[in-house]
Each structure stands twice: as C-alpha cells, then as structure tokens.
Image (tube, rainbow, N blue to C red):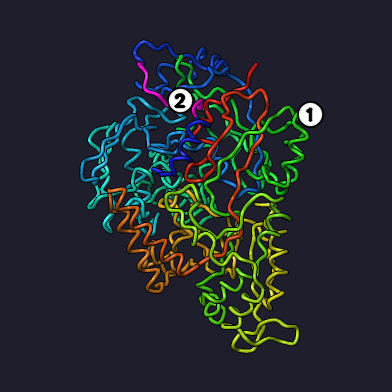
Amino acid sequence: MIKLSKVYVALLCALLILISMPTALAQDSMKYKQAPMLDAQVASGELPPVDQRLPKNPLVVQTPEIGTYGGTWHMGTKGSGDDAIYTRTVGYHNLVRWDVGWTKVIPDVAEAFDVNDAGTVFTFHLREGMKWSDGEPFTADDILYAANDNYLNPDVYAAPPVWLTSGGKPAVVTKTDDVTVVFTFSAPAGMFLQQLATPNASHMTAQPKHYLSQFHKNYAKPEDLDAAMKKAGVEAWTDLYNQKGGSVGGKPNTLWNNADLPTIYPYHVVTPLSAEATQIELARNPYFYAVDTEGDQLPYIDNMNYTVSQDVQTLVLKALNGEIDMQDRHIGTNANRAVFFDNQEKGNYHFYSLVPSSSNVMVISLNLTNPDKQKRAVYQNKDFRIGLSEAINRQELIDVVWVGQGKPSQVAPRPESQYYDEELSTQYTQYDVDAANASLDKVLPNKDSDGFRLLPDGTRLVVSVEVIQGLQPEWPPALELIQQYWEAVGVKTEIVLEERTLFYDRKAANQHDAGIWGGDGGLEVTLEPRWYFPYSNESIYGEAWQYYFNNPKDERAEEPPADIKKQMELYRTLLSTADPAGQKDLMNQILAITKEQFYTIGVSLTPNGYGIVKNNMGNVPDTILNAYLYPSPAPVNTFTFFFKK
C-alpha cells in the first residue's frame, strides 16, 4: 500500500468519496442486460445471451451514476511508442488492483485471494465461467501459462522479474483446480500483492494460452513455427511471439499491435497500433466480466478511438475544437492551461484535477556507466554533479518554463510521503555560480580558449543530453536554459532531440551520454525506486548497473560500486519483509545512501496537474491521482464512464 501523511489521506478521502468502486453485492437475483449494439449478434446466434457470457460471479461495480450505453471515447496519442496510454485507459485488469484511493489492494480478475501468515503462499480464486473476448474460457491454465511459460521462462525473460521472486528464488506457480492458482515463495514476499496490482504484472492476465501457445516454442510444432517466423520476417521465435502479443522481457508492450489477440479487457483491438497507423480503434468486448449494480454489463461506451500524432500541438487543437472527450496525457501542460481555460465554453468541456505522485518535473541523468571511459570517470565524480546542480537557476526555470508552478527540488519522496526528507529534497538546489565553479574545478580545472572545460586528455568535454521530442513540451525549452547555465560555468552542452523508440534503444544499449525523464516514485517510493538506486531499465543514470541487479548474467551487466550493491541488498531484503515497519526502515537506509551519493539532478517539485473532459461525459471524478504504477485514470474505473443523452 501507499502510506501517505494523515493530512494528505484526509484530503484524498474528501476528494475521492464519490468515485466509483468495485463492490461485493448479491448477484443471485440480478438480471443482466447488455449494450444495444450486441442485440443483433445475440439474435442471430453469433453471440450467446449476456448471462452466458458473464462469469458466475461478475465483478459488480458501484458507480456514481448508472450510465447509458453508446458512443465513442476520442483521445490522442503521441506517436507509435505511446503504448502506456492504452494501459492507462483500458488495459488495467490484473488479478488484483488498487482501490481508488491507492491505499490497499483489492480483488479484480480474481474474485478473492488469501495469504498465509508467513507471507509466502498467495492463493487466488478466479471467477468461474469467465471468458476471453473470443468466448474461450479464462482459467487457471492461462495464469500458469503467463507465469511459467512467460515470466519464468528464460527464453522469454532472461531473468525472472524481481517482483516474482523472494529470497533470491522465483515463485512456484501451481493450480489447485481450474479457478484456483497458488503462488508459493521460498521467503516472505512482502511486496508481491502491491506489485501484482501495478502495470508491471499486467501480462499475468493478458496471455491467452489457447492463442499464444501456437507461437511458443514449448507448444508449437517446429515446422509451423518456422513457417510463421518466415511469414513474419523474423529469425527468432521470441520476436514472432512478441509481435503476436506475448510477454517478452525487455521488448515493447505489443498487446495493442494484434487485432487477433484475445483479451479480457473491456475493449478489444480493431485497428492495431503500428508505425504507420494514424487511428487506433478498439471495440466493446462482449465477454467483459463486470456489471453495474443494476446488472448492466460494462463498459457503457461502445468504442475507443485514439488519434496518433507526432505533433502534440495537433492534439491540443483537436481538444480545443471539442474533438477529444477526456484526456490529460500530453496536452495538460502548464503552458496550455490558459488557452484551455479560455476555450471551455466553445469546446464544451471542463477541467478535472490531477494529484501527482511524481517527485520532479524533470530529472537530468548523466550516464554514470558511460561507455566513454573519460566521461564515465567525470560523471561518477559527485563534485561534478553537484557543480552542475548548483549552476541551475531553478526559480527562473520554474517562472519561465513552468509559468511559476513548482518549487526547487531534487529527485526525492514528495512532502506528502512518509519517506520525505527535506535535506534530500533541497540539497544543492541553491543557485550559486561561484559554488558551482568551485565544485567543477575540483574535477575539470582546465579550460580551452573559449572557456570550456577540458577532459584529462585535453579534449573539450561536451555533455549531450538526449530528450524525447514532443513527449513533454516543457523539456526542450528548459534544456535550452540549462544549456546556458552550464555553459556559463564552462560545461559545453548539446541538446539531442530524438524519437521515443530511438531514446529507449540507445539507453538499453548503454549508448546514451545523458538523458531526461520525469520523476516517478515520489509517492510510490518502495514500489518505484528507479531514482533511488539502479532498479530498472528506467534508471537511466546506471543502465549497466540495473542489468546487474535484474540479471547479473546479462552481457550488458556491470558490477556496481559497493554503496549501490548495498542498496540492492537492502531492497531485496525489503522484498522479503512482510512487516511494514521493517520495510520502512530498510527503505530509509536505501534513501540515506541515495542522499549521500546524489545520482541525479532534479529541477522542481511537480505541481498539481489537470485534464479536460467533455461536459456530457459522466462518472468522471473531479480529482484523480496521477501515477503510472497507479495507472491513472484506469483505477477510477474508466469502463464506467458514459455519455449522457
């Protein structure tokens, strides 16, 4: 669970009290109803009646309003690499999920779960009669397939995900019967349920065995697999498997790339995501397993439509014209706030608020495992990072780029978090050119005729900062100011704008010099420690070190310094600790090392955000928590949104 300060919890409770939540209601006497768009298919025999499509005990959802069926929800995406938007809107249906307030884990695909006193055995009871979108049964065999043939298969995942291990060993996943799955760990798995409620575990309920096994080496006939690989133009069966929607560790999420992939989500793919696609279309899943309190099968909205654009401004114009129904991603920036505010009546929309989990609007990460040995030595010197941080005029950045919204801050747990440390948050944030030069002089005292600092071999140091073009419109102008600040203290700086897939490819290969990203983990500190030690492939300051943490046998892995190894050991102990007080103590030890080592450079505490929603869209709350591990807005039950007649 995410433990927040008492004041913050009280605020959230007040804001979220009317938001829809799953509920356990008597279903024996419930009469089920379906969307009118399915009537003809049922009448013709193409689909079974609704009560035969639903599980014996559907998920019953309490909604602020009973909705009406129909319509298409229009949104916009940024390029073909923006797969997170689908998870955040329609793809959050795990064995368990977060409650709306992000305070506890509750049942979802599993109608119930049990945990033994030792925290080593987790039993999940599935919904009897639940089906995939093609009508095939969803059973314990699908969970076993996702676990044993995907997550725990070394051909698919080079090493088991950290969240699926404890005590250094992976879970043993078995079934008792068709609706009962058991995860058994060799040591307490103190964070397993929480991790299972995040998008990290989304593939556990997204791998239909009856479909994907035909592309899996353990099941398909070799000649059939070879023919399918040849047709797809790939040489490895795992590449084919990933194309079809299989879970392949380290590969992009392809659940949205294949219209033939069955799903349990409220919508299935009609027009798939691809490099060339301009529109992604999803249609109602007639077998979706949830109903409202009156027995209406969900979702209420018939279809989802996502416009794919390389230009965020195009999405902004569509929103201003009333062509986007509800969205905050990409368009809800501080720079756009005024124009959206002024256009509310014309665009027929209003605002909703976003409460951020992010610790920082912009994280600057030098690659501490840089392939350039000279740069690596410079970047690993803490005095160099301190000097760069002290050279940044954060208040000017906040005023000019973030229109005065924010507060100078490093990358650290947010003030609302139980892990907040003021010293960690504020160290080296004071703008001081003299102090910056003094720190930098300790590392690179020599300069060329233009005043730029020289590496030990006499060549000019150039810091190339890579940033995804168009992802966050504030980042490039902020970098332009940072470029001026750094060059004023003798550090030549280049800004490299690149497409998202290239950015990810380069950091995965440890080829990047420096990079920019957002400050995930401000509230979900123990769940998302990417900035506190090299935890995942999002820890772009130490890619080679995170490979060591996740799979020491990976050819890209590099043994980290002692302090980082200590953090890794502490975190593994935390994962095997069921006691919340023990977890807190271990995380505080990790953060103490983070403060001392100062891995990354932050700019500003992330302020509250906003999104826009059409005035005729119902069940959309006024306030939504904003995070990826709480993949907003999905946990507020987006499948209950509807268009008022």
Q: Is residue 22 within the magenta segment? A: yes
Can residue 588 be found in the magenta stretch? no
Q: Nearer the viewer, residue 149 or 639?
A: 639
**Which is more toward the observer, 28 or 152?**
28
- Circle 2 residue: 287
Q: Where is 292 relative to 511, above or below?
A: above
Residue 604, position as x, y percentages in the image: 61, 56
Q: Is residue 526 left or right of residue 320?
A: left
2 or 1: tag closer to the N-terminus: 2
**Percent x, y of residue 636:** 51, 32
Q: What are the residue bounds of the magenta stretch?
A: 17-26
- Circle 1: element type: helix
Asked if one can make out residue 602 in the rendered structure from this viewpoint, the answer is yes
Viewer-nearest residue: 352 or 472: 352
Labels 2 and 1 touching (C-beta < 8 A): no
The disc label shown at residue 187, or none: none
For mark 2, does the 10 Å Cα neighbourhood hold few (<14), some (14 to 19), or many (20 or more) residues?
many
> Badge 1: few (under 14), some or many (20 or more) residues near its Cα, within 10 Å?
few
Instruction: Please tell me whether residue 562 is drawn above or below residue 516 in the rendered image.
Output: below
Q: What residue did someone put label 1 on?
A: 346
In the displayed structure, 187 sits above or below 307; it is below
